[in-house]
Image (tube, helix red, strand yellow):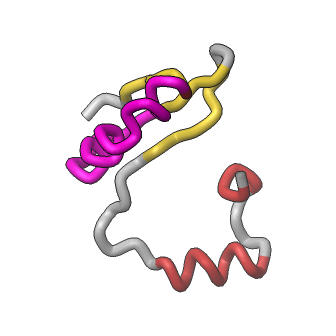
Amino acid sequence: MQTITWSATKARNEFFDLLTQVAMGQSFIVEKDKKEVALVPPIKKGTDWKGLKKARATGDLPAVFYG
């Protein structure tokens, strides 16, 4: 699936539609003032959340993951 770009206003006004589409596998980029500010990807099954939290706590993740 191709990533869809929405303005922050549209994402706010249609938030539940955005979540429904993300749950079906669609990814979104949200723009504010014509700048990309957020990526909303679906959660992939099998994500190691404990490992991700541990990596974040130890600083083993790139800065892009820290928001």
Residue 67 percent across, percent down from the top left = 71, 51
Magenta residues, as a range? 9-28
Name the residue: 26% across, 53% down.
23
Determine which quarter of the picture holds residue 55.
bottom right
User: Where is 37 relative to 43, above or below?
Assistant: above
Magenta stretch secondary structure, dominant:
helix
Q: Is residue 66 left or right of residue 48?
A: right
Quarter placement of the N terminus: top left
User: Where is 42 relative to 16, above or below?
Assistant: below
Which of these two is toward me, 15 or 40? 15
Q: Residue pushed farthest left?
A: 24
Determine which quarter of the picture holds residue 61.
bottom right
Name the residue: 21% across, 48% down.
24
Residue 54 percent across, percent down from the top left = 65, 83
Name the residue: 64% across, 23% down.
32
Any magenta on residue 11? yes
Determine which quarter of the picture holds residue 43.
bottom left
Residue 11 percent across, percent down from the top left = 46, 32
Residue 49 percent across, percent down from the top left = 49, 78
